[in-house]
Every structure is written in structure tokens, then in C-alpha cells.
Image (cartoon, grey):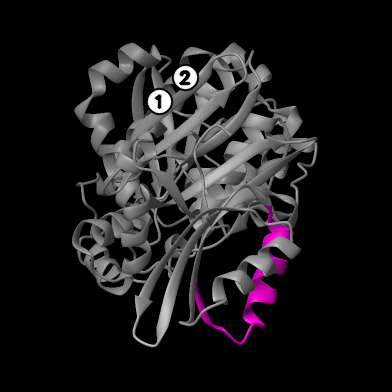
Amino acid sequence: MAHSAGQLHIGLLGCGTIGSGVFHLIRKNAAGLADAAGREMVLARILVKELEEPRPFPVDRTRMTTDQSEVLDDEEIDIYIELMGGIDPALSYALKVLGRGKPLVTANKELIARHGRELMEAAAAGGTVIRFEAAVGGGIPLIRPMEESLGGDNVEKIMGIVNGTTNYVLTRMSAEGITYEKALSEAQKLGYAEADPTADVSAGDAASKMAILCSIAFKAGFTADQVYREGIQKVSPDDIENARELGYAVKLLAIAERDGGGVSARVHPTMVPLDHPLASITGNFNAIFVMGESVGDLMFYGQGAGSLPTATAILGDVVDISRNPGKQAAARRSYWSKPGEVKPIEDVETRFYTVLRVVDRPGVLAKIAGVFGDNSVSLESVVQKGIGDSAQIVLITHKVVERNFQSALKGLKELEVVLEIPSVIRVESGRE
């Protein structure tokens, strides 16, 4: 294909659900994209694993190849988009592209969360840039506003719903009172959850996104394995009902904040007050609060996944690179080379919701209160419910250091009057 000075030639690495969406939007919105980018966008070459793979949107077969060298070594390609997912071979392809001095746009959160430093340094060495707006929050503009619009402020805290699958599951459990297993099965039938949903429900996906947001917010290179994570598999319909009675909703939240001299970063099921905006985020939507020292609270909300929302964010990065070639030097994120340090979860302060199943007899509450007191855990509320020969105690603590709370749990398990501790969920009230 002959290169024209009036065209922006794009090499696409991977063409599944999102890649076919990119091809579709480039064709559908050709005039608007050309106006925005200052040049006509042309998808010149497309690297695929399988030529005949079914795709949500039709793609020009003549531009596809299974030979990586036809795409990676094409001198006429101006910019690359990586949508292969995973680490291998995406990392080696990304490093090769950046090493050739070509800009790279990716939606691969795992790649950035695990190898961000290597990629940023490769981009700097190659005199080019890597952009990844679509890696967090799908179609929601988030990365660029945090880097650019908030560049003059200090981010104090990030808190949000960054995984649509788990939010859909918890929404269904809340609305219908159904079990986690049934809600997950529904999500899989609707295509909101993968056949193997582990990365979503165990919070691995959200931890990768949290690492990226931490790196940008706190100006250092954080990795996914530094982010504490707990999945939603143990959340029960009883927990959701108890939360509602106490004035809360249960969400899987990603939370990072400046904490003393350090940064805490965690993803776990969280009870948030029903009047907090995050409590009303339903279905597979995402919403992220960014709390700045000067700007105050901002909320970014929208479709956190899906072919066309994600493709929109990808093309936004392509437009930005095309329009602002001189900005690339300033966008190399040298701060990523400084290792980010995260406080151990044991040192983080938060509140806890806990359910205890206990023997129903006098003096039990006093023994439980004694264990909490011995571990410097103060109780905010206590509700007791009778169930036959046993009773259920539902309590919420005041803010407490995790280490002290876990020590109290250990002490409670040793009490003969405590039969079971079926639930422990952290409680958040926003800007604390």
C-alpha cells in the first residue's frame, strides 16, 4: 500500500473483539477522525492469530496477516495499536515497536501493570511514546485527565469500581437476593464474564488497573503484585441484606491513598454508604473517584469495557499522538523508573463489618467485647439476631489498624462461645 503524506498508517497487533471495533470506527467515523487527527487514518496492516476467526465487526481480510514481520518491520507504519492481551508475545512486540521509535497505543492493562517501567524506558530510549487510556475504565477518559488536567495538583486518594463483571454480579445479588454463583452464571451467559472468570472475581483485573492509576497519581512505578486484593467469592446474600439494613451497599472497590508518608493500595469487597455516589453504580458500569488536594472530588463514570467504548479510547490516544507530536518528549513518564512503595495491608487503617455466629447465652457479648478491647478495637455498632440455639452478632468497628483487627479475629476464634466468623468486609465512607 503506497504511503501518502496525508495519511496516518496504523499497524494493528491483534484483531479480536476490540480490534474489530477499532477497524469499524475508523471506517464509520473516517471524516471526523481525519479532522481530529489532522490526517486520514488508514489501518494498513493487521496481525492476527487466525484469519478465519469470527469477529463482532467485519474486517478487511486483505489487510490481515499471520506473519508478524510483515507488520512489525513495515517502515510505512506510523503508529501501532497493541490489542493482543497478556504478556507473551505482546511485550516483545511492544518493545520492538518502541525500539524502532514508533508510537504505541495499547489497551493491555496487564502489560502496563507488570512491565510499565520497562516500556516507559524503552519509549524514552526510542524517542517515542506509549499511551494506554483504554487500559483502565474502557471508554472512560481517565488516564489523560489525571496526567494532564490534574498535573498541577496532588492526588490524595483514588476510589472506584474498575471491574464491570464484579459490579454486575454484586448488583444482581443486591437486586434479587440471589447467590454469588447464580449471579456469576447469569453474567457468563450475557457475556459480561469470561468462561474462566478468575481474573475478575478474584480482583486480579482490578489490581492491575489500580497499579496503573497509582503510578500516575503518585508519580512512581507501581506493579500489580504490590496491590493487596481480595475477591467477591465469599460475599453472601446475607451480607448484602445486612449491609442494606445498616445503610450500606457492597461493592468491589479499588482504593489507593496517600497514607502517612506512604501509599496504600488495595482492592476488596467494601461497604459504602447508600448515599455515596458509588453505591448507585449498577450493572457493568465503572466509576472512579479522584480526590485532589486542591481540585476536590471528581468522578469519572461510564462503560468500563466493551468493543466500541474501548475502541473509542484507543482512537482518542491515536488522535492525541497525531495532533501533538511535539508533546511526546514530555509524555515519557520518567517517574515510572522510581519504584513505588506500598504500605503493607497490616499497617492500613480502615473500618470493618463482621458477622459472628455465637452460642446464645448470657455473657457472650462481654467476652467478645473483651477480646476487641484487648486488641485496641473500638466498636461503632452492634446488632444481635437470634437463630435457634445460636445467635448472630453483626458489628461495625471504628477505624482500626488491620494488624490489630486480625489479632482480635484470632482471639475471637479461640473463644468457645464463638462458633463461626462467616463474614468480614471492610467499610469505607469516602474522604476520611
Cβ atoms at labels 1 and 2 below 8 Å apart: yes
Type of the residue with mark 2: Asp
Q: Which residues are magenta?
A: 401-422
Establish if 22 lies above or below 378.
above
In the image, taking residue 423 as reference, residue 140 lies left or right, namely left
Residue 77 visible here: no
Secondary structure of the residue carrying tag 1 is helix
- Residue at horizontal 36 percent and vertical 34 percent from the top: 277
Instruction: Name the spot of residue 63 as percent of width and height, x first.
Output: 33, 44
Establish if 276 lies above or below 235.
above
Secondary structure of the residue carrying tag 2 is helix
Of 108 and 220, nearer the camera is: 220
Type of the residue with mark 1: Gly
- Residue at horizontal 32 percent and vertical 53 percent from the top: 244
Pick the quarter of the image with the N terminus: top left
Residue sitting at the far front: 362
Mark number, residue 210: none
In the image, taking residue 152 as reference, residue 322 lies left or right, namely left
Of 70 and 424, nearer the camera is: 424
> Which residue lies under the disc numbered 2?
320
Image quadrant in which you'd find residue 169: bottom left
Image quadrant in which you'd find residue 200: bottom left
Mark number, residue 316: 1
- Residue at horizontal 49 percent and vertical 23 percent from the top: 297
Establish if 262 lies above or below 424.
above
Residue 211 visible here: yes
Of 153 and 403, nearer the camera is: 403
Instruction: Name the spot of residue 332 as percent of width and height, x first.
Output: 68, 26
In the image, taking residue 136 as reference, residue 44 lies left or right, namely left
Of 386 and 305, nearer the camera is: 386
Local packing at callout 2 (Cα closer than 10 Å; few below 14, some 14-19, many 20+) is some
Separation (CA) of disc 1 from disc 2: 6 Å
